[in-house]
Image (tube, helix red, strand yellow):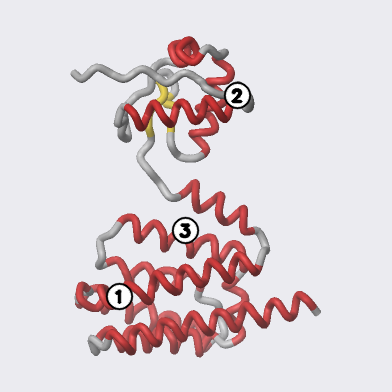
Amino acid sequence: MATMKSIKPLSRPPSLHVTVQESLRGYIEDNGLRAGNPLPPETFLAQQLGVGRNSVREAIKALESLGILETRRGIGVFVKEFSFQPLLDNLAYGLGDSLRDVEELREIRRVLETGLIGKTIDLISEEDVAELRAVTERMRERAERNESFAEEDEQFHRLLFRCHNNRMLAGLIEVFWGAFYKASDFANLTNSDPLATWRDHHEIVEAIVARDVEKARTRLDEHYQGIMQVIEKNKQTIQT
């Protein structure tokens, strides 16, 4: 077994709990610790850092909230498998009701999805296409009843890029999608013209089936332009 590197001593006394967090992060990185690997006991860490156990405990709790560590009761503290969920929660909370932030988030999503739609066309299977059509059909049924279909909308965008088999991409889409809806209450905003929203999704699928990259990209881009118009209308309503 390789010799473990020692934990780095603290270099800055101010903001002790933050400094302890940074030192613990450095220890994890320096030793190449991965999900499931244990950290030394709190007592050992406190001695190495020259701080009290409470400071170590606070730092561990903070890193738990970020999804970096997890405490297993009666066993110890372990490096946690990476998850976007803490980022999603913090991003949605941080955005609040800021429409400017929602606009910026929409732009990031637009660039991400339009840039990758060509690869989707190269990779997508008949099964994925069938599921996309089933989702858009449910959208149409809800739209005709003038109902919101936020859940189907989210499923659509996940299915659109599922064929990439890219966990990072899937996580980013989830982060952007969840934060966007929580921050903008977009599920309610889209009710202004649900049939138009359904039609956007329907035509994206048909362009994919036709293997028409430019049309698919254009339709996806126009879909996000429509979202921008909805946001602008909502801004004007709030300002007046």
Residue 66: x percent and y percent?
49, 40
Which circle marks residue 175 in the picture? 3
Q: Image quadrant of residue 104?
A: bottom right
Other-residue count near label 3 (Cα within 10 Å), few / some / many at <14 / 14–19 / ≥20: many
Residue that numbered label 2 is attached to: 16
Q: Nearer the viewer, mark 2 or mark 1?
A: 2
Tag 1: residue type?
Glu
Give the camera-side residue of 128 and 113: 113
Q: Secondary structure at mark 2?
A: helix
Residue 52: x percent and y percent?
57, 13
* Circle nearer the N terminus (2, 1): 2
Q: Secondary structure at mark 3?
A: helix
**Number of disc labels:** 3
Other-residue count near label 1 (Cα within 10 Å), few / some / many at <14 / 14–19 / ≥20: some
- 218, above or below 94, in the image: below
Residue 191: x percent and y percent?
59, 81
Other-residue count near label 2 (Cα within 10 Å), few / some / many at <14 / 14–19 / ≥20: some
* Circle nearer the N terminus (2, 3): 2
Q: Nearer the viewer, mark 3 or mark 1?
A: 3
Q: Image quadrant of residue 100?
A: bottom right
* Circle nearer the N terminus (3, 1): 1
- 23, above or below 160, in the image: above
Residue at image x 47%, y 58%? 175
Q: Contact, CB < 8 Å: mark 2 with mark 3? A: no
The quadrant of the image that shows the N terminus is: top left
